[in-house]
């Protein structure tokens, strides 16, 4: 747990493009102390941790919520996956619920589209990025005005802000593993997003 705390504090600092010296001055601690905390040489007192979090603009409840979320391992057994099935398509959720929360959230699922079916929204995108790995069949990715053919063994990644649709225009089942980040609470299994 100590190791994770230092790494997490360092990650927050670097994401805000602050130096150790800047944070230390604003938090009222020495640069040496902050460096030792980040390298897990010492654990900060609660008062010191709260001062550092204040400099980062991170409320303590959010920090500890993300810390808890980031430290969980969830295993979803094959027979325990949530399955969303509608006419012509099926999604199996692959990641645990804790992965869909926090700063680095994502949703992962196994997608199956019957011939002639499609998922997505040709008129609207959404925040984030997506990664798909095709395991069976082929389909078209309509991405804005462009059309890309994707086949078994291909991987595809893109920014989700551009409207996009996956169309199975073949006569065989299309299957793919799909990851969407961030998991911002939208319905990834509905009509609007993949």
Image (spheres, rainbow, N blue to C red):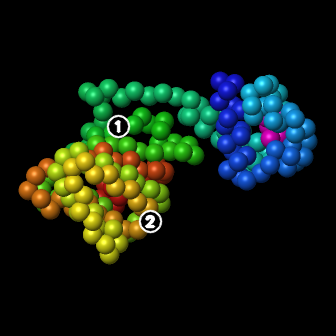
The N terminus, quarter of image: top right
Disc number placed over residue 147 in the picture, else none: none
Crowdedness near tag 1: few (<14), some (14–19) or many (≥20) residues, C-alpha within 10 Å: many
Report the front residue among 62 and 26: 26
Q: Residue at x 28, y 28 (%)?
A: 78
From the viewer's perspective, tell me whether residue 168 is left or right of residue 30.
Answer: left
Secondary element type, mark 1: loop
Residue 35: percent from the left, percent from the top? 81, 36
From where the camera sits, is residue 113 visible?
A: no
From the viewer's perspective, tell me whether residue 73 is left or right of residue 23.
Answer: left
Q: Residue at x 56, y 29 (%)?
A: 71
Q: Quadrant of residue 68?
A: top right
Q: Which residue is mark 1?
A: 94
Residue 144: percent from the left, percent from the top? 35, 72
Residue 153: percent from the left, percent from the top? 25, 48
Q: Which residue is mark 2?
A: 161
Q: CA distance from mark 2 to mark 1?
A: 23 Å
- What span is in magenta? 48-52
Crowdedness near tag 2: few (<14), some (14–19) or many (≥20) residues, C-alpha within 10 Å: some
Report the front residue among 30 and 56: 30
Residue furthest left as drawn? 171
Whether the residues at callouts 2 and 1 have beta carbons within 8 Å, the answer is no
| Helix, strand or loop for the magenta stretch, by majority | helix
Secondary element type, mark 2: loop
């Amino acid at each position: 747990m100590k190791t994770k705390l230092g790494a997490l504090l360092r990650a927050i600092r670097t994401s805000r493009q602050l130096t150790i010296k800047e944070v230390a001055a604003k938090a009222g601690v020495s640069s040496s102390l902050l460096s030792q905390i980040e390298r897990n040489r010492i654990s900060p007192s609660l008062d010191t941790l709260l001062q550092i979090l204040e400099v980062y603009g991170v409320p303590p409840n959010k920090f500890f919520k993300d810390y808890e979320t980031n430290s969980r391992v969830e295993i979803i057994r094959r027979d325990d996956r949530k399955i969303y099935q509608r006419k012509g398509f099926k999604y199996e959720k692959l990641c645990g619920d804790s992965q869909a929360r926090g700063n680095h959230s994502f949703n992962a699922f196994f997608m199956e589209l019957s011939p002639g079916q499609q998922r997505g929204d040709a008129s609207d995108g959404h925040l984030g990025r997506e990664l798909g790995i095709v395991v069976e069949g082929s389909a078209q990715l309509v991405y804005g005005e462009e059309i890309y053919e994707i086949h078994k063994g291909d991987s595809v990644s893109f920014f989700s802000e551009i409207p996009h649709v996956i169309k199975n225009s073949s006569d065989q089942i299309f299957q793919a593993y799909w990851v969407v980040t961030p998991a911002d609470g939208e319905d990834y299994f509905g009509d609007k997003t993949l």
